[in-house]
Amino acid sequence: MDKKDLLQRLARQRAALGLTGQQVAERAGLTERSIRNALGAQGNPQLSSLLALVDALDMELQLVPKGFGAAVVPAGDAAYRPVGTRIGDALATARADTPPAPSTVPRRSPR
């Protein structure tokens, strides 16, 4: 995900929550102008503003190694299915904008 994708995702989240720029600014402790600038086409917010904005939009920012969560099939093992993780599934969803595949880990039945 690059900076443009991140800012677009934040703008979509603001719209999905139905928040105005002023409401986001109040929640983030920033000015409405800084919110408008951060989410604009040329947005380049400081890290502190970005973290405040992410929190105000009921999101969290997580750092993971590049490629984390990508499906990797060992050579010659077409039946291999990676174990789903919360972050890996979220990354797959963000990349494809489709729901993550259900986990293939069998669940224990209650006793």
Image: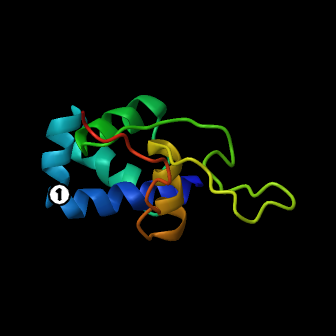
In-front residue for pair 111/76: 111
Q: Residue furthest top?
A: 48
Q: Quadrant of the C terminus?
A: top left
Q: Residue at x 38, y 33 (%)?
A: 51
Residue 24 is situated, as x and y percent measured from the top left of the image, at 19, 46
5 relative to 18 in the view: left or right: right
Q: Residue at x 22, y 47 (%)?
A: 32
Q: Quadrant of the N terminus?
A: bottom right
- Number of numbered labels in the structure image: 1
Residue 76 is situated, as x and y percent measured from the top left of the image, at 86, 62
Residue 47 is situated, as x and y percent measured from the top left of the image, at 47, 32
Mark 1, secondary structure of its residue: helix
In-front residue for pair 10/61: 61
Looking at the image, can residue 42 be seen? no
Looking at the image, can residue 15 be seen? yes
Q: Quadrant of residue 95?
A: bottom right
13 relative to 81 in the view: left or right: left
| Residue denoted by label 1 | 17
Which amino acid, by three-letter code, is at mark 1?
Leu
Q: Residue at x 31, y 43 (%)?
A: 59
Crowd rating for badge 1 (residues with CA inside 10 Å; few <14, some 14–19, many 20+): few
Residue 95 to residue 36: above or below: below
Residue 36 is situated, as x and y percent measured from the top left of the image, at 31, 54
Q: Quadrant of residue 109?
A: top left
In-front residue for pair 80/19: 80
1 relative to 44 in the view: left or right: right
Residue 87 to residue 48: above or below: below
Residue 28 to residue 82: above or below: above
